[in-house]
Structures are given as structure tokens and as C-alpha cells.
Image (cartoon, helix red, strand yellow):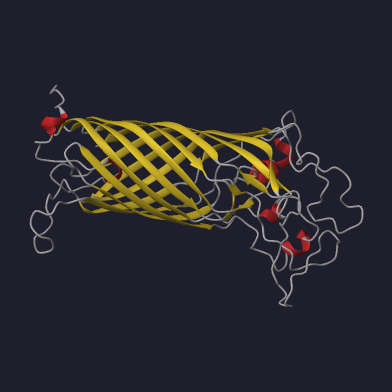
Amino acid sequence: MRAWLPAAVALLAPAVHAAHVTDVADAADEKHTLEVDLDATYNHMRAQTTITREQGAGLTEELKHVRTLDTVDLRLGIGLWHDLELHALAPIAVRDVQEWSQAGPTSTLSTNTISPSGCAAAGSCTAVQPILPIPGKSEHVGFFDPTVGITWGPINEERELRLKPELYPPGKPVSTWVIGFDWTFPMPGGKLDGPSSWGAASALGGTRPAATPESRKAHVFTLWTAFSKRYKVLEPYLVLAGTAPFAAKGAFDNCHAAVLSDVAPANCAGLWAGETGYKPPWEGLFSLGAELVAAEDVIAERKLSFEIRGDVRWHGPGRDYTQVTDALGKLTYADEYVTTGGQAGIYGRISRWFHLRVYGTLAVDSAHFLTHEDIGDDKNNDGKITISGGSGSPAPDQNPVYDFRLDQVGRRLRAAPSLIWGVAGNLSLNF
């Protein structure tokens, strides 16, 4: 076995290799007639959030929420041509558990007397009506929606160390550049992650349902690009991505929640039909990182490197699966927020066909409201928004999933900054 070359000696090697984020399976070249990559990644993630509630001009702590998620991600990449790859990803939740408990000595969620419809009717808001079970727990397991995609590398630093002289002055350095498009789609025949299975049934000590599925039935389109450039032993990279999701037929509709307002039966079947369902948020990602090559043997195709990366991900507003979805038995309309995080890891290529990567992640979600439905819209075009407020009178303008207990200003739930940490390991076989 040839010994690994020190990093200093590796600088003299005639070839360089792209960073992990710009690595693309290829075909029909001098190294690979047809490259096939098989990846398996184990992820362990834990997210902790304190959920507060508006009380007058301030906020009170209501719940401590913890989500523990263990997944195995299976990925297949096939080279189609020079730096052109077709890939597929199947993530599986081995364990996905959410638990919530009371944050303080008392909770307004347990002592609530307000009706979901409002308090316009005399005597309608006098009895105690707990909003959600405390403490509570939900469990999910199974496949998430799968993803297929294509990646193309217009410029490969390893393949051509200089740009064409007719386009750029001689001696101009080359950066590896890749473009990718991914489509996440509802699993054929997959069962829906319906939060109405939980709600009151999520109470600890009671009869709870078995673990429910993970599929959310949405078409998610992601366009991304990445750049990397080798400078001796350092290889910095940049990743930009944008995601546009659209709920598919069969996605969860809040009109199927167990607890709704008095106008829901009429309005869900009337002017609001099709407007109360899953509305996943748009997202944008900016990542900046670098690999530090500690040892490399280009001839034997071996490499040891350390990686550090920082991410900023923007999440738009949407009616989504939030920290309180399973506790309430329905989706909630959350405001936009930002996830800021970092990642550090070790990458080793034992040989051309065997790769290993281990890394850890630490991130924080910014604070944002979790229950923020609009009260209504002028559906009958009479120039005003008429609401029932619990009076029992017809109100076609009132949003049937608006909850006076949680969506009204002064009563909304808010997620304090969430702490997210995780560890992961990846094995890759390349043929």
C-alpha cells in the first residue's frame, strides 16, 4: 500500500479534486466509463424550543418543546456524461419524536376559557377549555417524500486548469462550478402525515395512536449552484439555493382538524374551499465553507481533509408543520424566520471507491410567531369583512380555520430562538 502523501507534497501533484459540495458523478471519460455512487447517511438531530404566548404587552413562557430525529438518507448518483449526474434520494425516519411540557408553574393553555369561535355569544366563554394536552408526545416513522434531481458541472477545475484563451486572458484560474435542480414529490401510495391523528390524543398517559407517517405531499422544486476553488491545501466553496414548494393533491387541509370555529362547516364547503390547506414556505440558502486538506495522494486517489461551513437559511411565511402542530392537531400559520448555523467535519477518501465523512452541526432558529392566521377576507365583495365571532350568524368572510384562542393578537404563540444540534456520518461507495 502506498503511504499517504503529506499535504506539502500533494501541492506538486498534477491533478486537483473538487470540494465535496461540487463533486459530480460523471461518465465517458478516462477514469470512469460509467460512475455509480451509493451513499448512506445517518443523521441524529435534536431541536429545543421554548414556546411563549402573548399576554397583554408581554410574553409568558408556556411550553418546552423538544424534537429528536434520527434518519437514514439513501442516495444513488449515476453519471450520464462528463460532469452530468442523475441522482435520487430516499430519506427514512427511524425515530421522530416530539415532546412538550409546561414551562412554568401555570399555563394559560390549560386554564383557557375562550372558544375557538370567539366569545360573541353570551356565556360561551366561561367554562375552562384546555387548548392542548400538557404534557404531550407524538411519534412519526417511515419515508419522507423522495427526491430526484440532476447536477451539471459546466466548469471542472480537475478537467481543465485554464479557461479558453478566447474567452479569458491566459493564466486566469479556473473554479469548479456546478448547477443542480432537485424535485421532491409525494411518494406514490404514501400515507399522509395528518396532525389530526394527534391533538388531544397526544396526551401522555392516555391512549395514543401508533407512530404516523412522514409524507407531507408537496412538490418541492430546488434550484442551486455551487463554486469551489483549490488554493494549495485550502479549498473554499460557496453554495446558493432557492426552494419553491407547492402542496399536492391530498395534502392536509385544516378544515379536517378536530377543533374548528362555528363558521367552519359552511365556509369550508363554500367560498373558502381550497384555501385552508397546507401552504409550505419558500426558502433560500446561502452557505460559505472551506476544506483544509491535511494529506493527499493523488495517484492512489486518497485524501484526508477537515471541513468547516456556515449556513444562513431563510424560511418564508406559510401554513406549515410547526412545533405546535401535533399538539393542536392542525397546521399553523407561522411567520418568516432565519436559521443560522455552522458545521464542522472530517472527510476521508480511503480509495477511489470508498469515502467516509463525519460531521457535527449547530444552528439557531430566530424567534417567530407560530399562530398567525388572517381573520378573514372580503369574499362577498361588499366592502367589509363580516365575522361571526361565535355568535352563530352566517359570516362567509371569516376564515374558517381562524382560532380566536391563538391567532388573535395578544393571544398568539411564539417560538423563542430554537437551539438545534446534530451529528451525522456518511459512507459512500463509488464504482
Q: Is residue 407 above or below residue 127?
A: below
Kindly give the residue lying farthest to the right in the view shown: 122
Q: What residue do we see at 75% from left, 41% from top?
A: 109
Question: Does residue 235 show up?
Answer: yes
| Closer-to-camera residue (413/226) | 413
Residue 375 position in % (x across, y down) = 71, 61
Question: From the viewer's perspective, is 133 left or right of 94?
Answer: right
Kindly give the residue lying farthest to the front in the view shown: 57
**Picture quadrant where residue 269 is located:** bottom right
Residue 138 position in % (x across, y down) = 64, 36
Q: What residue do we see at 28% from left, 40% from top?
A: 290
Kindly give the residue lying farthest to the bottom in the view shown: 382
| Closer-to-camera residue (224/360) | 360
Instruction: Count up the numbered dots.
Output: 0
Question: From the viewer's perspective, is 282 left or right of 181?
Answer: right
Quarter holding the C terminus?
top left
**Picture quadrant where residue 357 is located:** top left
Residue 396 position in % (x across, y down) = 76, 68
Quarter holding the N terminus?
top left
Question: From the viewer's perspective, is 90 left or right of 164?
Answer: right
| Closer-to-camera residue (411/87) | 411
Question: Does residue 300 show up?
Answer: no
**Picture quadrant where residue 53 is located:** top right
Residue 17 position in % (x across, y down) = 19, 41
